[in-house]
Image (cartoon, grey):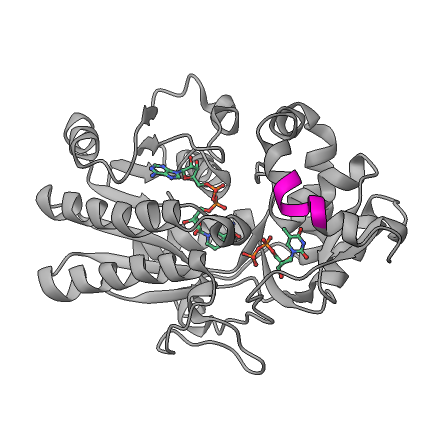
Amino acid sequence: MKNILVTGGAGFIGSNFVRYLLRKYPQYNCIVYDKLTYAGNMDNLRDLGDDPRYFFVRGDISDREEVDKVMVDHSIDSIVNFAAESHVDRSIIDPDAFVQTDVVGTCVLLDAARKHSIERLHQVSTDEVYGSIEKGMFKEGDSLEPNSPYAASKAGAELLVRAYHETYGLNTVVTRGSNTFGPYQYPEKIASLFITNAIDDHPLPLYGDGTQVRDWLYVEDHCSGIDVVLHEGQAGQVYNLGGGNERTNIIVTKLILELMHKPESLIVSVQDRPGHDRRYALDCTLLHSLGWHPVHSFEDAFEKTVSWYRENEWWWRDIKSGAFKEYYQQQYGDRLRASAGVR
Ligand code: NAD
Ligand code: TYD
């Protein structure tokens, strides 16, 4: 493989993956194709600026003509699709963009992959497609029971990927990654939002009782897992990709405050997210059998992440001072007011 199209490469995981790929494979070209929505940010790729193996094309994955053009212009032979609307809370407010990008956009990429006979399309998916599990762990063959519009749109995308493999013999692979944290994460997800709020001594709005469980995965481990599946995965196969770090939200929140030497009084219990999944947990035996294991310990990786946000205020202050304020008000304004004085 030589010319890899990384859609959504200006987002959080995508930009980390581009850096990872260029570092590991000197013979690869990386073509980032990204619409630059609110979550896409050229600052995420700033340090790659003059690498001759890195190209940036602004475009929408649901635009057939633009996708076709980038495929031809850069002789693309593989696609890794990160492009998505990715935040559950936004999908509850307005699901439309999720269907358009996550479902229709993936379909357009699949058609382009067929048309240009590419070697492999890797769909970056999520453990949220399974829905919630009280006990035990999800295996790849389990049924998909998504509960949020985000999870449903990612499940829809995955089913199209499956159908293109079964019907047209397209060489596809899918990874279902768990909750990811690390540098360059748009400060709307719990880790990046709570760290940056804590730096400013602002409240940390914890949904409900905070006992929901997520399996945490450091972004470098997520990238290495995608790398292994992209290169070694079996065509048509889905792989769970989890960090093996199950933690409740309250534990994650307290860890952040402890690492930052901030008081627990910053935690504000707010109205829960509707349809809130209680627990995600992945059985990753299949991916382990390909030789992949996460190498970053949860606590060390969180410490590194906290340091990154502390040392890179230039990156997130800009974001938080723009349109983000409107979103924050809409998402948390009433919740925080209703919880005033409640701990
Ligand atoms: P992100 O929101 O940080 O980045 C998404 C990127 O996609 C942005 O750069 C955005 O501009 C781009 N994009 C959005 N719509 C587009 C379109 N129509 N055409 C082209 N580009 C478009 O997301 P992320 O957290 O980096 O997630 C990347 C992928 O990984 C997503 O597919 C997500 O479902 C999946 N995933 C994320 C997590 C997580 O914890 N963040 C976990 C598992 C899987
Ligand atoms: P999030 O980072 O949005 O990821 P996902 O919904 O994809 O798992 O949320 C992680 C957990 O943190 C989830 O259980 C919801 C909770 N959460 C809060 O309690 N407060 C918040 O402000 C956010 C954004 C999330």
Residue 176 rendering spot, x and y as whole percentages: 42, 61
Q: Main secondary structure of the magenta part?
A: helix
| In the displayed structure image, the side of residue 100 where residue 51 appears, left or right | right
Q: Quadrant of the C terminus?
A: bottom right
Residue 291 rendering spot, x and y as whole percentages: 43, 63
| In the displayed structure image, the side of residue 81 where residue 111 appears, left or right | left
- Quarter-of-image position of residue 198: top right
Residue at 33%, 51% (x, y): give it.
99
Residue at 45%, 74% (x, y): give it.
285
- Looking at the rendering, the quadrant in which ligand 1 lies is top left
For the residue pair 239 and 7, the one nearer the viewer reads as: 7
Residue at 75%, 40% (x, y): give it.
197
For the residue pair 119 and 81, the one nearer the viewer reads as: 81
Residue 150 rendering spot, x and y as whole percentages: 44, 56
Residue 233 in view of the camera: no
For the residue pair 126 and 218, the one nearer the viewer reads as: 126
| In the displayed structure image, the side of residue 147 where residue 181 appears, left or right | right
Residue at 19%, 49% (x, y): give it.
110
Residue 233 rendering spot, x and y as whole percentages: 30, 61
Residue 298 in view of the camera: yes
Magenta stretch containing residue 113, yes or no?
Answer: no
Q: Does residue 274 lie above or below 193 as drawn?
A: below
Specify start and end residues of the magenta stretch as a single range: 329-334
